[in-house]
Image (cartoon, grey):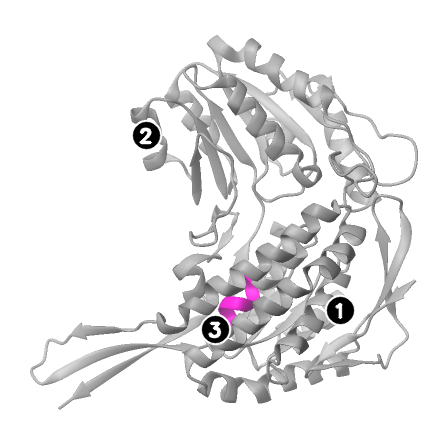
Amino acid sequence: MQCYQNFINNGFVASEGDAVFTVLDPATGQPYAQVPAATTAEALRAVEAATTAQKPWAALPACERGRYLHQLAAALQARAGQIGAVLARESGKSLSDATSEAIYAAEITRYHAEWARRIEGEVIPSDNPQENLLLMREAIGVVACLIPFNFPVYTLLRKIAPALITGNTVVVRPSNNTPCSAFEIAQAVLDAGLPAGVVNILTMSHVVAETVCTHPRVGMITLTGSVGAGRKVLEYSRVNIAKSSLELGGKTPAIIEADANLVQAANDIVASALSHCGQLCTSVERVYVQESVYEDFVRLLKERFAARQYGNRASHPNYMGPLVNATTRLNIHQMVARAVDDGAVLETGGFIPEGPGYFYPPTLLTACRQDMEIVQEEIFGPVLCVLQYRTVDEALQMANDHQFGLASVLYSENYRTAMRFANHIEAGELYVNRTPADPYQGYHSGWKRSGLGGDDGKHGMLEFTQTRLVVLKY
């Protein structure tokens, strides 16, 4: 069994405690690796190391920090095969998908490295003569980065690259379901020659994570996770009034107008709903279909759902892989059963397969109603709900009648309809005639309970800064 060590102050350190987390291969349910549960003392040393490193790191010219990030991107690229192999085993992804995630993480690191000469302040006109107002942007300090299980390599770099380029240092807590790839990234940090203490990576219990997040030296907490986890982070942030950036739940609606290319829409939506077994914040989970094309579109969806095979992607890379764990699978199955009891029609799937691993079949539900739990709550699995509507106004109202507002999708060839949704959809993102893919030069930010702040692009990078106004009389 593979064993890892926590990464503190540019060293892999033997744990002082006996507690460990056992990492399971979700395709088999068998133990794959062990990682140490950091003690409180170890976590405090990580914060101290990040604190000591922060001011010298921020004092470097931004282009010098950018050079280090370019070196990190090169190290990630060089180790993409190793990172991908570990990620595939702990997550159930195919080796190709996992390796591609490592390469994409290198790309977002390069992207943020290029912001080095573009971290801009402002010169603002004053009301007084012979006076200038200078708005400067500065690093926040130490940032606690809380990483999810579903894209643990990409999301880790999505967090730390903008934090580092703006002069912050980081303490990273990877998901205890998929922590091993984070320690492979730690080796890339060493390969890149980053100064000691700039990046620290530790697996932790919730209690120890709270100690880190409420530490007086931690000025920001950034999380990708559930609404429940977001509420917990807000509790942590109250202690020191730390800044919070939260990407939380999603329930992406897709609206299918009568003039849409139905085949293309069906292909895209099935791929979105079933990618990584539906474990994406922006996966399409609810589909609203114009009533005149409802039966045709349901037929297209059903054909594709029924044809999609699932299994261990180590031997069948084109199959849909497993869910993260047994508890998640049971919760999803019970949610589907309650929907059927409430009147939904089960078109495909909806059962727990026999055999090892945490697999769940592609599951399609029709005759759903807007008030159903399955429509109102995030599933985070390979389950798609279908509803029908008559008018554009009704579709827009149903899409917006929700607690979440992360991403949304519209299929239509009518530019007036597209602009209506662009102006009135209650979501941080609208994708027209395609499904979500989070371009890293954009801005990934949720409305409502889908989060605060955001990731990616200029605005995501600026999340990791604070401002200082200088009023200069001359």
- In this view, the residue in front, 367 or 294, is 294
Dot 3 lies on which element? helix
Q: Using the image, determine if residue 46 lies above or below residue 107.
A: below
The image position of residue 228, as x and y in percent, is 64, 52
- In this view, the residue in front, 75 or 267, is 75
Residue 230 shows up from this direction: no
Q: Estimate the spatial distance between the alpha carbons at disc 2 and disc 3, rounded to whole Å.
A: 38 Å
The residue that disc 3 covers is 165
Marks 3 and 1, the one that precedes in the sequence: 3
The residue that disc 1 covers is 204
Residue at the spot 85% in from the left edge and 50% down from the top edge: 25
- In this view, the residue in front, 283 or 442, is 442
Q: Amino acid at mark 1?
A: Met
Q: Estimate the spatial distance between the alpha carbons at disc 3 and disc 1, rounded to whole Å.
A: 26 Å
* Proximity of marks 3 and 1: CB atoms separated by less than 8 Å: no
The image position of residue 206, as x and y in percent, is 74, 65
What segment is highlighted magenta in the picture? 158-163
Dot 1 lies on which element? loop
Residue at the spot 42% in from the left edge and 39% down from the top edge: 426
Q: Residue furthest left?
A: 129
The image position of residue 307, as x and y in percent, is 73, 21
> Could you say which disc has been placed on residue 294 in the image?
none
The residue that disc 2 covers is 420
The crowding category of the residue bearing disc 2, from other C-alpha atoms within 10 Å (few below 14, some 14 to 19, many at least 20), is few
Dot 2 lies on which element? helix
The crowding category of the residue bearing disc 1, from other C-alpha atoms within 10 Å (few below 14, some 14 to 19, many at least 20), is many
The image position of residue 434, as x and y in percent, is 48, 33
Q: Using the image, determine if residue 377 lies above or below residue 19.
A: above
Q: Estimate the spatial distance between the alpha carbons at disc 2 and disc 1, rounded to whole Å.
A: 46 Å
Q: Amino acid at mark 2?
A: Arg
